[in-house]
Amino acid sequence: MNLNLDFQIREKDFVTLYGPSGSGKTTTLRILSGLTQPDTGFIKVNNEIWLDTEKKINLSVQKRKLGYVFQDYALFPNMSIKENLTFALEKGQKKNIIDELLETMELVQLKHLKPEKLSGGQKQRVAIARALVRQPKLLLLDEPFSSLDIEMRLKLQDFILRAHRLYRLTTILVSHDISEVYKVSNKMFVIENGTITKQGDPPSIFSSSLTSRKFQFVGEIVKIENENIVYIVSVLIGNNIAKIIATDQEIQGLQVGSKVLVASKAFNPILRKIE
Amino acid sequence: MNVLQGEISEIKTEGSLSLVKVMVQNCVISSLVIDTPQSSDYLKTGHQINVVFKETEVILAKQLEGLISVQNKLNCIVEHIERGEVLSKISMDFHGLRIVSIITRNAADQLRIVEKENITALIKSTEVSLAPYD
Amino acid sequence: MIDLEPFYLTLKLALTTTVILFAIGLPIAYWLAYSKFRLKAVVEVMVSLPLVLPPSVLGFYLLIAFSPENVLGKFFDQYLNTRLVFTFPGLVIASVIYSLPFMVQPLQSGFKTLPASLIEASYILGKSKFKTLCKILIPNMKASLLTGIVLSFAHTIGEFGVVLMIGGNIPNETKVVSVAIYDEVQSMNYHNANVYAGILFALTFIILLSVYLINHRFYKINSSN
């Protein structure tokens, strides 16, 4: 497969690269970070040229200052949590960033433990904290939530959003999870077979099939109950479960875990102030 | 979900609300949307579009007389009835298209709905959505 | 009474060989594990040859090469003032070559079993290849390091053919335990041969046993996460 991409990202954007597995999303992150060399290419970040194959410019991985969170976390097993973070410090960099990150990512209690003692979600938080030690402006996340359960995923999405705002990051997330894309990113590129097929903000990309709906959310099916004549489908939207009536025709191809768009006309919902 | 194919025949706009009339099998179905021809590309007369509404929003009536505020009145023929304890599902033919209504079992019994008879399907225009062709 | 000198010589040879092997084996293993060089396989074969070649073949070629009449031997003779044939330094060089696969192969497989993302993560954090090797790779392959070091050590203790070809049987210079046993048997001193052999057997058994025990512990630690 050929990977052929041309895109620009604005500063402080939260961008998702969305697409089926094997479409070239991870490779894109690897090329940006310098871990993989493209045949030809040009990368410019903040007026600094990282790659220009024509002029034979190729900044080494070490010099492209960015944060990268790997799918398998890649924590160093021989070091404690705090040591993993300290290892990332640059020469002469002040150490107070370590404590600040441990605090932000809620890792203070765990800082003396080795990575093997942590749960998936905790490891992920350490990986994010470690990626931020050098205070990069660009953060790359390679499917950071794929191996976590729903609850942990939601919590980590909040952590990442918090870090994105707090440290004024430009973040690029690789994902094939619609609800995740919806929740965290403000811009997305759909990559299929090595090319960008769609780009824009997530709502306009996902909801093009229902143009006049103003009341719509993306969620994940957690339960489907057959109630004779109709089905009751429980959908997790954000932190809430919504129950939706569906017919046997609507339910075809859906199962627990399916990502769905929940849409209604804007005329039904009732608004009431919460005291 | 009931999905019927049609063509936009008229658009009336006030503020950011539009009342869109769609021709489906020579009948008009109207839809109220929070969009205007200025804000949305799909709102153009002559545009092919899908009319979408939920089965549970379809009201049924027989020998309908007098005045009623519901704009969309579709004359159908009952094809099939499925009865549950609480709900009933009525499948109907609308000029060759299929419309399904889910109403309570009580209501279906009171209307004494039987197969092959004429029936009117009513849908409020606030419950009708518009979607482009797939 | 048996002479303890061969034991001293054997341990000195094994220790010197292991230290030198570690110093040259680590870079070779690193290169073999990560290089994309096309003729890498040739180097791999060279490193592994001592595993399959009869020690006498290796010893014969080394004997020729070490001879002061040939380039290598001449070089050592003239510039380093060292004779390699029938001397201790010659034994060390021969042992290093002979035990090379026992150091390189465990280290190479140790490098290969570490996830690539560990190295990549370190590079992305701005760390050099050397710092990554010292702080990330080596500390996370302790089992392989131990295996490489101990196997090289034990293998050097146990070598016979190469030592006999290169070193001969010179007391206090090249007469290591394995040669001493051979010598005693030739002179029909079965009792002395028995003592030498028994001690050598016990020594190597204990060394290998401790490696396996320690490696099982490493394995348990690694598999508990």
Image: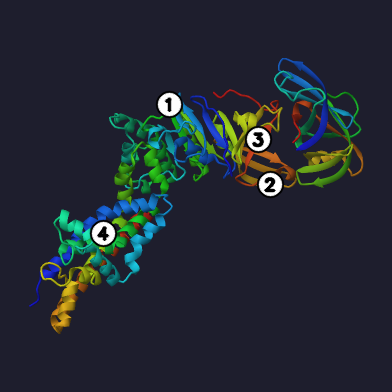
Give the mark toward the camera: 4 or 1. 4
**C-alpha span from label 2 to label 4:** 59 Å
Same chain letter for marks 2 and 1: yes
Three-letter amino acid code of the residue under disc 1: Leu
Image location of residue A40, percent across then percent down: 52, 36
Three-letter amino acid code of the residue under disc 4: Ile
Give the mark toward the camera: 1 or 3. 1
**Image mark 1: chain:** A
- Residue on which the image places disc 1: A166
A37 in relation to A271, above or below: below
- Residue on which the image places disc 4: C149
**C-alpha span from label 1 to label 3:** 31 Å
Quadrant of the rendered image containing residue C222:
bottom left
Circle nearer the N terminus (1, 3): 1
**Image mark 4: chain:** C
Asked if residue C65 can be seen in this view, the reply is yes
Instruction: Give the crowd class for mark 1: few <14, some 14-19, many >=20 residues within 10 Å.
Output: few
Instruction: Give the crowd class for mark 3: few <14, some 14-19, many >=20 residues within 10 Å.
Output: some
Image location of residue A272, percent across then percent down: 61, 24
Give the mark toward the camera: 2 or 3. 2
Same chain letter for marks 1 and 3: yes
- Residue on which the image places disc 3: A262
Asked if residue A184 can be seen in this view, the reply is no
| Residues under numbered marks 2 and 1 in contact, where contact means CB atoms less than 8 Å apart | no
- Residue on which the image places disc 2: A253
